Image (cartoon, helix red, strand yellow):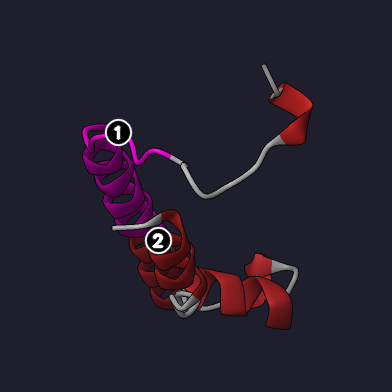
Amino acid sequence: MTSELLRDCVAGVTPVDLLGMRLLKACPQPADLPRETLTQAVIEIIEYTGRCQAAAQRLSQLAPIPLITVAIPEYGL
């Protein structure tokens, strides 16, 4: 896998549609929301956070990709 392919893969990921984020945009004061809806949104965010942490852990175990084709003039030796 090249760095360009990895960049394209990450850029092509669609944003996750979380109920909690939609509720925050639509209703900044959660006191007006039904308890069931608020509970569902919090559970969804907690589960999403866990999935993100698991993905970050898996990514940290990947072998590094050498950047042979990318020039970084700031760190020239």
Q: Residue at (46%, 71%) from the top-left corner?
A: 8
**Of discs 2 and 1, which sits in the foreground?**
2
Where's residue 17, x and y in %? 47, 79
Residue at x 24% of width, y 35% of height = 63
Residue 49 belongs to the span the image colors magenta? yes
Give the residue pinned by disc 1.
60
Q: Residue 61's image quarter? A: top left
Determine whether 73 is above or below 39 in the image. above
Counting from the top left corner in percent of width and height, residue 18 is at: 46, 74
- In space, the residues marked 2 and 1 are separated at their CA atoms by 15 Å
Amino acid carrying mark 2 in the image: Leu
Q: Position of residue 68 (x, y in %)?
A: 46, 42
Q: Does residue 34 lie above or below 20 as drawn?
A: below
Front residue of 50 and 28? 50
Query: Quick check: 14 above or below 61?
Result: below
Magenta span of residues: 45-66
Q: Is disc 2 surrounded by few (<14), some (14 to 19) or many (20+) residues within 10 Å?
A: few
Q: Is residue 15 magenta?
A: no
Q: Quadrant of residue 41?
A: bottom left
Q: Which residue is mark 2?
A: 6
Marks 2,1: beta carbons within 8 A: no
Q: Is residue 18 left or right of residue 55?
A: right
Residue type beneath disc 1: Ser
Q: Is residue 70 left or right of residue 19?
A: right
SS majority, magenta:
helix
